[in-house]
Image (spheres, coloured by chain):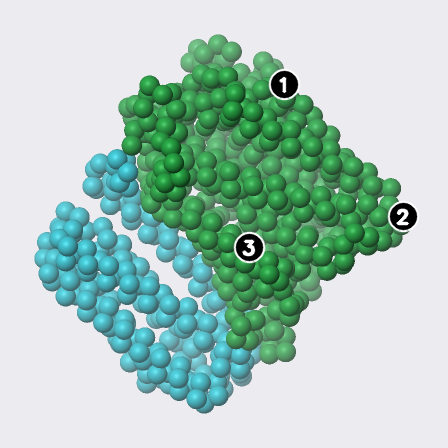
Chain colours: A green, B cyan
Amino acid sequence: MTGNPETGRGYLAERGWRSWAYTLDHKRIGVMYLLTTIAFFLVGGVFALLLRLELLSPQAKYFSDHTYNVFFTLHGAMMIFLFIIPAIPSGLGNFFIPMHIGARDVAFPRLNLASYWVFVAGFLVVLASLVSPMDTGWTFYTPYSAKTGAAVATLSFGIFLIGMSSILTGLNFIVTIHKLRAPGMSWHRLPLFIWGMYSTSIIQVVATPVVGVTFLLLALERLVGVAFFDPAKGGDPVLFQHFFWFYSHPVVYVMILPAMGIVSEVIPVFSRKPIFGYAAIAYSSLAIAFIGFLVWGHHMFTSAMSPLANAIFSFLTFFVAVPTAVKVFNWIATLYKGSITFESPMLYALTFIFLFIIGGLTGPFLAALSTNVQLHDTYFVVAHFHYTMMGGTVMGFFAGLHYWFPKMTGKMLNEKVARIAWALVFIGFNVTFFTMFIVGTRGMPRRYAEYVPKFHAENVVSTVGSAILALGILVMMWNFVQGLRKGARAPGNPWYALSLEWQSASPPETENFHEVPTVTAWPYGYGTPKGPPA
Amino acid sequence: MSSPHAEHGDPAVAFETAKLGIWTFLATEVLLFGALFTAYAVYRAKFPALFQAEHLKLDRVLGTVNTVVLITSSLTVVLGVDAVRKGKTRLLQAYYGATVLLGGVFLCVKYVEWTAEFSHGVFPGTNIFFSLYFVMTGLHGLHVFLGMCVLAYVVLLARKGRLSENYTTPVEMSGLYWHFVDLVWIYLLPLLYLIG
């Protein structure tokens, strides 16, 4: 089982599909998750491009209204459930949590593999639902979802399985972080990526079962007519919204916290400075996870909740901005007077901060009750969550991919191409989504295939932006493939980073470390006597 | 090398790891049922008269019998754990076997109840009370069934001689799960059968 050091291929030494399908190695499972989720990202992206194509003209032109509804449902559902929730935790998290804490593997390797295959099974069920594709939007609101002719029960079951996989992964990580830290790896020496992943795992374990049971009830309403969400039988469709957002709001922190963890790793490495405010960043992750559970009602300000409930949810939503801002200030303080270099991981990390500030600061507009009523279900909301989720999480994901590519593959990326791709992504993203803030404030509602002609110019700009963005992502993917095929041999520690994963070979041996590492310091001693020169 | 315990050669650490794992899993389960209990609270507050009237259609005698059956099964689980800690693996098999059997009795009684309710024209879609009743007892029944499978697997492990006083992990973890399933029923009985 041990990778042969002679080949220099480390954990990748074994070949053949069996060595992957039955592997218990967290690194291989992580790589399988990464490849799977990136594939879903590309497919979900194609749906987005089709939406933008339709919106080139104010009248429905290329697709029927129903097809348009299917496309935005599939875009949302795939991006959320199949890409952005599992990508960083199950992909990069699987690979790097054990390496960050100096462990040989996760606590339950078999459960880890099982969770991957449950995920794949969930995807296959989702695929089966395409015989009669969903047109409800990714939120599945009742009563429409209980009535539509689409295969809601099938899709619900698929997402139930994906949720189960998410729970098992979170459980595995919580136990791993608690029990398998190397000697000397105290909680306050943990890399901040681990703090982000730990907070994420708690949300996965606590929130996911609620959405699981919600989808179960939705499926049962369609199959045997249970009355939970059926107003004709005394049920309440708004209860569905409560249950749905009890999961689906905290889950945006499942998406963002690991990305914040990656940014917290990358910023100090490329500014050669110790992270500023370690404890503040670490505990703000937990604070976000905790407060994140108390704000779900802000998705429902126009759903006839009581004014008191609205006011409380509004207040708590403003409150969650505090620990988020704490992180941003600490990253900026880390950059202050650092010896900053702009390699591609750093470019994406800085992009994260830039875009996330825009995404974050447009949040309070939506948290405030009076402006929310105006902006609810407009393109302003679409722009807001794409700035946080794509501008935030996906940029963090890209930062992580570029940062850890040499470690995972043993090959270096072409840095010049990586920067070209970054520039295209950065420009394309802003052109696509900033225009949505503008049309949103002017009242353009989301989820319609047609719109009034006065928004035409902005929509053309946005579609052009989406093409630039797609081109950037294609160049990035091409660069990954080229890097794999003929990238230069990566040294063990190309970025001179201090965290444990860089102290192993590139790619790492199957057992990660030749001997169990003993930890004597935190991983952020850059520019201090403990750190290597830049 | 690929064993889950390779990382932590110390069996005591392995036991603690498994224990944290199962407790985390039970936290997930609490939230799974928690959503249903929340729905119960919402609708009972909204329709007190309906809950009062409809719950009288349930068979309290069978509900009570099942409660006794499940509590007894928790007792046999405790005795089984105690047996394996003392290295008496044959006794463990007897107690865990009895638990599986009691679980089976529980499900049979539940089957009788559901059949009677269906024959009286009461279905999951009848009204909000019976939606809650069938979904909550159904999901709980599914957990009982899965618990029986897990306990039967533990009996199999014991028969193969894989368990001893030095390796009790599967016994203790499956036992905790069974207690949880039992505990859910302890809440379901008064909420569904004994509204008053």
- Tell me the kind of residue under disc 1: Lys
Chain ID of residue with mark 1: A
Residue identified by numbered label 2: A454
Q: Which residue is drawn at 37% across and 50% down?
A: B24
| Residue B168 rendering spot, x and y as whole percentages | 19, 51
Question: Element type at marker 2?
Answer: helix
Q: Residues within 10 Å of mark 3 (few under 14, many from 20)?
A: some
Q: State the residue in front, A7 or A70.
A: A7
CA separation, marks 2 and 3? 38 Å
Is residue A100 at all visible to an observer of this figure? yes
Q: State the residue in front, A485 or B141.
A: A485
- Tell me the kind of residue under disc 2: Lys
CA separation, marks 1 and 2? 41 Å
Residue A38 disc label? none
Name the residue at the bottom extreme: B120
| Residue A234 rendering spot, x and y as whole percentages | 60, 77
User: Is the residue under label 3 in contact with that under label 2 (CB below 8 Å)?
Assistant: no
Residue identified by numbered label 1: A416
Whichever of callouts 3 and 1 sits on the residue coming sooner in the sequence is 3
Q: Residue at x 63, y 55 (%)?
A: A138
Question: Element type at marker 3?
Answer: helix
Check chain identity for marks 1 and 2: say if they share one: yes
For this view, does A115 lie left or right of residue A477?
Answer: left
Is residue A353 at all visible to an observer of this figure? no
Whichever of callouts 2 and 3 sits on the residue coming sooner in the sequence is 3
Q: Nearer the viewer, mark 3 or mark 1?
A: 3
Residue identified by numbered label 3: A127
Whichever of callouts 1 and 2 sits on the residue coming sooner in the sequence is 1
User: Is the residue under label 1 in contact with that under label 3 (CB below 8 Å)?
Assistant: no
| Residue A420 rendering spot, x and y as whole percentages | 67, 23
Name the residue at the right extreme: A454
Chain ID of residue with mark 2: A
